[in-house]
Amino acid sequence: MKNKLYLLSLFCVLLAACNAQKKEKSVTERIDPFAITEGEENLEIKQNEFPEIKSETNLDKLIVIIAKQNVVNEKFVGIAGTYTDVYAAFERMNEIASSDELFRLLDHASGAVRVYAYKCLQTREAGLSENAKVILEKSDMEVDWFSGCIRSVVPIQQFLEEK
């Protein structure tokens, strides 16, 4: 009985820590996993990490970084608000990849690469992301998603509903 009480207390503390600085959202409000949330301006220094990724000019090397871990991260994840190499690779991919290259990546073996390619296309002309959406709607692939302190497996279609 003591062990169960201890585990329940530990779970409550961890849950509270993960949600400590988050603004409450209504049930009907969609959550954008790539939106900047309150307090992230204080984490700007962490974005100076991974200088080798930030200066990479070879798209294939960035794709390998993302595909190897095969997880879609928010900009900052975990209790400590960690800025990851995967997210750095995504940001750099968005800077150097052409729209044609991104469309080819929508059929990549890695679900994370597909999602990040779609997210890159969303930052470009509106028609591009709509065309990409049609391609990904046909996919039955699932992908790991690290959001805040929670890591879960979700269908790629969940990312199409965002925005």
Image: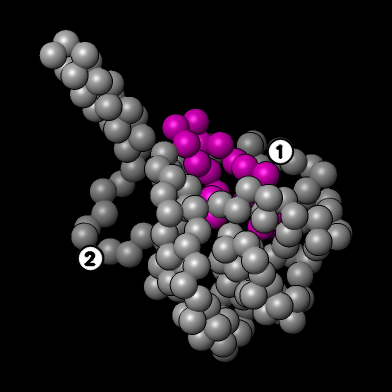
* 81 is within the stretch colored magenta: yes
Q: Is residue 132 above or below residue 17?
A: below
Residue 28: mark: 2
Inspect this view and state whether residue 48 appears: yes
- Earlier in the chain: of badge 1 and badge 2, it is 2
Q: Where is residue 24 in the image (x, y as percent from the top left)?
A: 26, 48
Q: Quadrant of residue 90?
A: bottom right
Locate residue 5, reporting x and y percent: 17, 17
In space, the residues marked 1 and 2 are separated at their CA atoms by 35 Å
Tag 1, which secondary structure? loop
Image check: 32 left or right of 131?
left
Image point (32%, 28%), residue name? 14
The circle on residue 20 is none
Question: How many other residues sit within 10 Å of disc 2, few (<14), some (14-19) or many (≥20)?
Answer: few
Closest to the observer: 131 or 91?
131
Q: Is residue 149 positioned above or below 138 on the image?
A: above
Callout 1, which amino acid? Answer: Glu
Residue 134 spot, x, y in % from top left: 51, 86
Q: Which amino acid does label 2 sit on?
A: Thr
Residue at left 74%, top 81%?
100
Q: Name the residue under label 1.
A: 49
**Residue 33, quarter of the rendered image:** bottom left
Residue drawn at point x = 72 percent, y = 51 percent:
65
Count of labels in the image: 2
Camera-side residue of 113 and 53: 113
| Point 41% across, 49% down: residue | 152
Q: Which residues, given as a range, are shown in magenta?
A: 72-92
